[in-house]
Image (tube, helix red, strand yellow):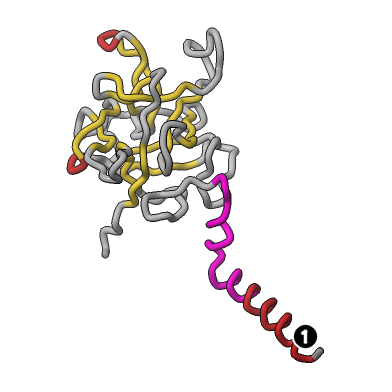
Amino acid sequence: MKITKFVVLSFLLFAFTATSIFPHAVHAEDPEAVIDVNGNEVTPDARYFIGAASDDNTTTLAVSATSQIICNSDVILSSMSNGLPVTFSSPVGESNDGVIREDSYLNVNFDAATCRMAGVSTMWKMELRPTMRGFVVTTGGVNGLNRFKITKYEGGNNSYQLSYCPISDPMCECSCACVPLGNVVDRLAPSTIPFPVVFEPVADKSS
């Protein structure tokens, strides 16, 4: 009887210690958490490359911008060496509990020097491009007005897809449902064919 109590107490002590020392492990089993290529949770404000998912687990394309100064740049697909890191955050008034989860509203920002043009941000937004005959993802967004989502990609394992979730006209004239984003002439834009992506953490500059 004493041995049984000792075993039970030892197990409870270990469980409590593990939870206290490794709080991140609690979230690791969160079925809604978005997972990066290393098997870790995607977290707010950490830097990631958004890469094109492939069957052989290699990433050759990454999200970038049409201009190095980021001002009013379209979001494009480029070689991995030209990829620009992004950060994710929750819109004003919403909480992500320290973990980016599937189906939660997000702001997406290029992690780049702030645009020198007054009032222009590195935040993603949707904008009409007459030359593209439709909407494309570009920069210059405003917190709370430009919502995106990450969901599982239905066409493959361990990959995700991005969607834009409009909250006002003109894209809400018929429906305000989230719109999948795909590769449209090398630009990230609304598409009936979602673009599968993975998230690759950016190494710390100090390491």
Residue 72 makes an appearance in the image: no
On screen, residue 80 above or below 126:
below
Magenta stretch containing residue 79, yes or no? no
Quadrant of residue 79 in the image?
A: top left
Residue at 49 percent across and 26 percent down: it is 145
What secondary structure is marked by label 1? helix
Tell me: residue 99, above or below residue 170: below
Measured as percent of width and height from the top left, residue 64 is found at 25, 34
Which class describes the residues within 10 Å of circle 1: few (<14), some (14-19), or many (20+)? few
Residue named by callout 1: 5
Q: Which residues are magenta?
A: 16-32
Residue 194 position within the rendered picture, expressed as x and y whole percent measured from the top left: 40, 26
Residue 149 percent across, percent down from the top left? 49, 33
28 horizontally vs 140: left or right: right
* Nearer-the-camera pick, 82 or 27: 27
Figure quadrant of residue 53: top left
